[in-house]
Each structure stands twice: as structure tokens, then as C-alpha cells.
Image (spheres, coloured by chain):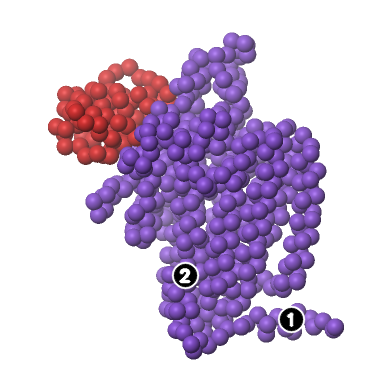
Chain colours: A purple, B red
Amino acid sequence: MPRLPRSEWYDLTRDMNWDLTYVTEDEAFPPQLSNSFGVPAESWWTWDEPYKITYSEYVHNQAGKDAGLFSVNNVVSRSKIFDNLDPGWKAAIIAHYGAIAVAEYQAGIGEARMARFGRAAAWRNMAMFGTLDETRHGQLQTYFPYQALNKEPRLDWAHKAYHTNEWGIIAARHLFDDMFTANDAVSMAIQLTYTFETGFTNLQFLGMAADAMKVGDIDFGALISSIQTDEARHAQQGEPTIKVLMKEGKVDIAQNLLDRMFWRAWKLFSLLTGLSMDYYTPLEHRTHSFKEFMTEFITKQFIDQFRDFGLEKPWYWDQLLNEMEWLHHAYHLGVYYWRPTAWWSPVAGAGPAEREWLEEKYPGWNASFGKYWDVMGENIRAGHPELTLPETFPMVCNACQIPVCTPAGYAAGYLDSPLPRILDFEGRRYTFCSEPCQWVFEQSPDQFKGHLSIIDRFLGGVIQPPTIEGALAYMGLSPEEMGQDGTNYAWAFEGHPAPAAERKVG
Amino acid sequence: MALFPVQGIVEGDFVIVLAPVDDTDPMTVVAEKIAYHGVGKRVAVRPGPLKVRWKGTILADDATIASTGCAPMDVLEVLQT
């Protein structure tokens, strides 16, 4: 059978846009599932994806990717490569799998919603591929860690994490439910595919793949590279969606959707990627700091894209630049100090060489953040590692669900006050870590007001018994799963020689 | 006597902590209970008495949570003077 060139039939077969007669527009596209923001149906039909692919091409490409990827995994899973990885890198990938794998399945739900409720046939077609992509990513990122369970049982959290109430997962779930699991198709195209995937994860995955190869983790490197090629394609659903909104004069709506999700994405990105780049990746394999990465790829390249579409920097831009100086350093301290609440074992990354690097990348780090590690190091060397473990909980922001670290920003000279933002609303008190987090909440209070943070649950009697042990059990963490110091406190003794036999820690 | 949760900040620390105090506790005790979670653990110990600041005002050592009108989950700062 003769085959026509794709360009001669693609648009015809793709554009199955129907004039509705048996049902109303709202019945076919309920606003809760697909908010048109007042844009007429025919205007949405101009939606045109920048990257074209047919189903047969898609299947061919994906099969080839999987064949290569599973070959690598087959070989690596029988080798000693995982055993020999640096403890910091292990922390990074165990954290990654838990935070991301099941979220990819949830992203598949989001893509499927766009595949049904996207406002143009072309869009629905592309989202169908996105649904398959995200299903693939969920499967890959649960299967790869499953293959290494015999070497690291905590990799079980690739599947387990989202079925728990571990605090970081509450934060991730709160964000991702807002971004895709419970979002409407139009908002999702801007908030998931444009803001999060184009702005953050596409670039992050490129960086992580390169880092993995340098570290020698060819399994993870190949995995992430393969996933990134899918992301780069389906992330492009955002661009034509923004173009339609802009053409219809909906600039304020597009800007608002972007502003809300850019801030939210920044917070979780800072927690996950900030720690991986500046503390978990072995020093000799670091190519850039988290701040350098953010500056180059996010705040320069991504901002150019905003402007190409006629959008502007979010109103809180100066606050974002401010937090890039200090926030993830505080988060790292928090994750380390509250390490029993994590499913990975964080490394301190605060030995003399690491501190020198941090001081170079973040001038003033030793004075502003090194002082906390000084106190903890002294306690460890004095034989009191228990003083580096928690006996209460940090306050958690009612928007981002991450501990409130405003005192760190204040102590380091970046904030005018250490105080959190307090909102008393409809008889309930809410605490926020920043003005944009409060703004996110106030943009849609009915959406967020019923959610209980991990601290609200603790105080409200949901967590029983109301103790550290009770809370750890509530988070799904058994003693064997709780994070410990990833190097058994070796960092505290670097530059402070002490015979190993005399150490009273571990 | 009743358990009374507050948000505690130890001066110089990096994070706000949940601190359970008692509504009859004088500020000297409140300060110790909050400081317990930060001083000597993440923040270096400094000689000198601890003071509690609430809404920008240093509270008297013998004032209690109940007498000040402090509400649950208000933010109390502990200063190492």
C-alpha cells in the first residue's frame, strides 16, 4: 500500500473537532474539568502543537527507547555499580524515586484528562501520547528501584511513598494534586506542561542525567535521559495553550496561572534538587551550584520564553532571587536534623572541602549556615549524636507544606524578620513561610482551606499517640526505614582527627 | 494548667519549631522550653538569661502565657541576652 507523506494527511486526521448539537458545551467540557476561561470553542481549534508525531512513529520510537534502557538495566542490576555509589548520590536517587515515581502515574491521570477534555482535537491527540509517556515513566521509575531492592530496601519507597503520610510526600501530593491530579485541562497545560515541565523538570532531568553519568550511575543516567526525551515532547502542550489565551486577550489569566504554579514548583524544586545538587552530589562531580543552575536555566532561559509569549516575570521575582541565596541551605539543615522523618539517609555534605566549595558558591555561607554545622559537629565529636536528632517538629507552611525556615533567611541577612506570616481565616489559624505562599492560598482559599498540614494533624489529634514515635509511625516509617546520617558522622571528624575506635557515635 | 502549643523561634536558629508549653508557665520556663529545642543543638550556647519576645515586646519574666493573652500557636521568640 502506498504511503503518503505525513504532512499530507496529518492535519486532516488529527482535527476531529465537532460542533456539538446533542449536548451543551458545558456538558461536554465541564468547567471543573476544562475551564475555557471564556474562550469560544472555535478559537481553541486553532491550537497547533509545535512537535508532530503519529501513533506508529510514537510506538516505534518508544519501543526503541525501552529496548536500550532495559538492556542497560539488565546488565547494571547484576553488577556492583549500585553498591559502589557514593552515599550522597544514593540519598539523591532514593529521595528522587520516592518523590517522583508514583507522581508520574498521577501525571498520567492529568494527561488523560487533557486527552479527553483538552479543547482541541490536536491537543487531545498530543495528550494521549503524554498519557502513555507518564504511564511509562511511572512504570520505569518503580521497576528500576525494584530491581535494586536486594541492595537497598528503602528503594521500596519508590512505590510506597505516595501511600504514606510522610511529611515530604504530603508536600509533594499537595502540590501535584493542585498541578495535575485535581486540575482542569486548560490550567494544567499551563501549570504542568509549561510552568513545571518546560520551566523546571525538563532542565532538571538533563542536569541529573549528566550528573548521574559523571558519578558512574549509568542506570539512573540512562533512565533519566530516556524520560527527558518524552518530557521534551509532551511539555510543548503549554505553548499553544498560552498562545490561544493570549490571542483572546486572556493575558491576566495566563499570567496568574503561571505565577501561582511557578512559586509552588520552586518550593518543592528547592527541597529536592537544591539538596541533591549542593549537598548530595559528590563534590568532585559537581559542575555547578544549585543557584548557578537556577540562574542560568530557570531565571534566564525560561524567562525569555515568558516574554516571547507576552508574559512577564511573576510579581514576586525579587523574593525568588532572594530565596535562591539561602532557602535550600535551610531545607538541607532541616532534612538532616529531622532525618528520621525521611526515607533516605541524608549526608551532611559539611566536611571541610564541601564547606570551602559552599563558601565559594555562596559567599558568607560559613558565617550564615556553617555555624549550625559547627554546633552539630561539636556535639557529634563530644559523643552526643542524640543532640543532632529532633524532639519536636518544625512548623510547616500551610501552602507549600514545607518547614518554615524564615529564621534562616533572617539570620543570614536576607529577610527583615524571622517571623512567619499568620492568617486567621474563618476561625482557623494558618501559617505561611512567605508572602507568595500566602498569596497562593488566598487566590483559591476554598480549594486549600480544608487541608490539614502534618502539624495541624498532630495538634488536632489525628496522629496518635501525639509523640515523635507516634508521628513517625503515622508517616509510615519503621526504625529500619528512618533516615540516618549517610556517612555515619564521618563529616564531623574530617579535619578533627580522632581514632575511629574512640568515636562514640553510630 | 493546660498544654498550650506555640510557635517558637530561638534567636539565630534556622527554623520555627512547635513548642508545647503550659498556660501557667512563667516566661522564664517558656523560654527554657523553647530554647531546649535549639540552643546547644543548632545554636551555640551564650551566657546570660533568656528572654521571650511576643509581638515585638519583651515579656516580663514572671508573666505567664495566660496573663499575657497569648493565643495558641502565636509566635514566641527566645532571645539569648
Label pair 1/2, CB-CB below 8 angstroms = no
- Identified at 34% across, 54% down, the residue is A450
What's under tag 1, amino acid-wise?
A: Ser
Question: Which sits in the foreground, B5 or A334?
Answer: B5
Image mark for residue A7: 1
Pinpoint residue A402: horizontal percent, then vertical percent: 44, 44
Residue A265 x/y as whole percent: 50, 53
Circle 1: element type: helix
Residue A33, label in figure = 2
Q: Chain of mark 1?
A: A
Query: Is A474 or A209 nearer to us in this picture?
Result: A474
Q: Residue at x 30, y 31 (%)?
A: B20
> Callout 2, which amino acid?
Leu
Q: Residue at x 57, y 23 (%)?
A: A489
Q: Is residue A447 visible?
A: yes
Q: Residues within 10 Å of mark 1 (few under 14, many from 20)?
A: few
